[in-house]
């Protein structure tokens, strides 16, 4: 229990790639069957809705390309996403889950430290990758950190989970002179080389603490709660770049 | 003759422990959705503790706990520590309670499984009484039922 997190992960990786490897392979198939069963009905209704929507959107892509070419913009580099089903892992009775298992792994292009996102925003990060399965930490994990900024790029800081066990975040290191108002959107800053810029993290709630003349810490309401997410996307080509366009109003609509 | 029977019993125990561990990890996601989910690792440790010396039972708990911690990385080491202690203490009960009366076996499995669930829950910061006195006892009961079914296969002859 006192081992550093990196050592714990190394030990867990060793166990998962040796003794537990056959079980993980079988479990992966088990996940597939469960996910398929659960989503058949959902997919049927979605299919009907999407068919109507596709008809309505026909021609929008072509128009978009024409307009971009017209104003001389190079097509924005697209991040590669891998869809995955997420299963929270935890001890019996654990109120806020800290880790999860994905039903996709190295064979699908997922690597260590790959960001995991949902339509609402940041979910967590991949820690251990097996051929057909990956394990990661939610943002609720005590060791989770991400460089963040306000959506307008004015204020930067570090996001971490609050230490009291509640599913809420804290933005540390914000400049003392700048006052962030309630509802200010916080996104990833792209610094650090792990998370690309522009992934929604949450909204500012209030000031938690101030270091006189130095910095402020804010409480941040997360965009994604671990209990509320089951289908996620793993960013497999990240580190640099800006993915904020993926969460633009047009995409969400 | 006695040596052969004892060896057979050890082999049966090894097979049962491995089978329970395998099923625990394979069916874990399924159990999680049940009202009362048996913890087959705890079951394996408790059953084996009644047949092994304290050191061997603790080693069994350590090995199974390490596997459990590798699957759920949060609070790494908690299951290793608790299952090791459970194995050790379970084995000590051999000196206090001789024989395998149904009433004792049932109580032993239930109390052992409940203690594991409750201590584990408190250690991760849980504070819900409904978990401690409703969910955990239900899980312990399910674990006890599985243990009850398994004990005849490993019983020392």
Image (cartoon, rainbow, N blue to C red):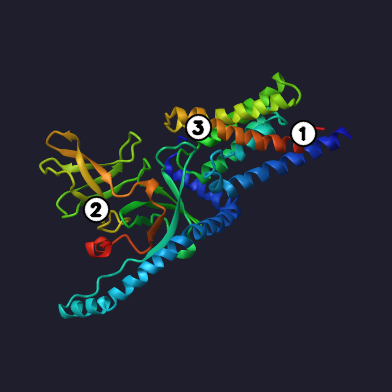
Among the 4 quarters of the image, the one containing residue A28: bottom right
| Mark 3, residue position | B120
* As drawn, A8 above or below A194: above
In the picture, measured across the screen, residue A125 lies left or right of residue A105, that is left
Return the x and y of residue A77 as percentages of the image width and height. Answer: 28, 70
Circle 2 Cα neighbour tier, 10 Å, few/some/many (<14 / 14–19 / ≥20): many
Q: Is A173 or A35 nearer to us in this picture?
A: A35
Residue A71: percent from the left, percent from the top?
A: 15, 77
Q: Is residue A139 visible?
A: yes
Give the distance between the C-alpha atoms of the residues marked 2 and 1, in whole angstroms: 60 Å
Dot 1: chain letter: B
Say which residue label 2 marks: A187
Badge 1: residue crowd in 10 Å (few <14, some 14–19, many ≥20): some
Determine whether A125 is above or below B149 in the image: below
Subunit of mark 2? A
On screen, residue A17 above or below A237: above
Mark positioned earlier in the residue sequence (3 or 1): 3
> Dot 3, crowdedness within 10 Å: few (<14), some or many (≥20)?
many
Numbered mark located on residue A137 in the image: none
Q: Secondary structure at mark 1?
A: loop
How far apart are the two marked residues, 3 and 2, measured between alpha carbons?
35 Å
**Toward which corner of the image does residue A214 lie, by quadrant?**
top left
Which residue position holds label 1? B155
Q: Using the image, name the chain to which the residue with label 3 belongs.
A: B
Do tags 3 and 2 sit on the same chain?
no
Marks 2 and 3: in contact by CB < 8 Å?
Answer: no
């Amino acid at each position: 229990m006192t081992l550093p997190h990196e050592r714990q992960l190394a030990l867990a990786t060793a166990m998962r790639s040796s003794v537990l490897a056959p079980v993980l392979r079988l479990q992966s198939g088990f996940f597939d069957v469960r996910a398929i069963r659960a989503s058949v009905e959902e997919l049927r209704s979605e299919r009907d809705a999407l068919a109507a929507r596709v008809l309505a959107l026909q021609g929008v892509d072509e128009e978009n390309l024409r307009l971009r070419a017209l104003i001389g913009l190079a097509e924005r580099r697209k991040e590669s996403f891998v869809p995955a089903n997420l299963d929270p892992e935890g001890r019996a009775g654990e109120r806020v889950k800290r880790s999860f298992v994905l039903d996709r792994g190295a064979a699908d292009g997922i690597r260590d430290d790959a960001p995991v996102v949902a339509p609402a925003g940041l979910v967590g990060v991949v820690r251990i990758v097996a051929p057909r399965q990956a394990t990661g930490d939610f943002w609720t994990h005590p060791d989770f950190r991400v460089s963040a900024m306000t959506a307008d790029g004015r204020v930067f800081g570090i996001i971490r989970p609050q230490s009291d066990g509640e599913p809420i975040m804290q933005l540390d290191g914000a400049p003392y002179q700048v006052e962030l108002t309630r509802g200010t959107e916080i996104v990833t800053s792209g610094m650090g080389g792990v998370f690309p810029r522009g992934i929604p993290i949450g909204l500012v709630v209030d000031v938690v603490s101030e270091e006189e003349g130095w910095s402020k810490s804010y409480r941040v309401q997360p965009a994604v709660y671990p209990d509320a997410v089951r289908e996620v996307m793993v960013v497999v080509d990240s580190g640099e770049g800006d993915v904020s366009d993926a969460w633009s109003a047009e995409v969400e609509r | 003759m006695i040596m052969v029977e004892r060896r057979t019993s050890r082999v049966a125990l090894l097979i049962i422990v491995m089978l329970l561990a395998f099923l625990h990890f394979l069916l874990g996601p399924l159990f999680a959705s049940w009202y009362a989910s048996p913890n087959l690792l705890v079951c394996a440790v408790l059953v084996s503790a009644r047949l092994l010396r304290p050191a061997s039972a603790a080693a069994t708990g350590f090995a199974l706990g390490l596997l459990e911690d590798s699957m759920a990385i949060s609070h790494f080491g908690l299951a290793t520590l608790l299952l090791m202690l459970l194995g050790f203490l379970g084995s000590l009960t051999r000196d206090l309670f001789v024989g395998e009366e149904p009433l004792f076996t049932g109580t032993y499995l239930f109390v052992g499984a409940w203690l594991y669930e409750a201590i584990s829950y408190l250690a991760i910061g849980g504070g819900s009484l409904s978990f401690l006195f409703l969910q955990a006892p239900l899980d312990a009961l399910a674990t006890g039922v599985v243990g009850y079914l398994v004990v005849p296969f490993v019983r020392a002859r």
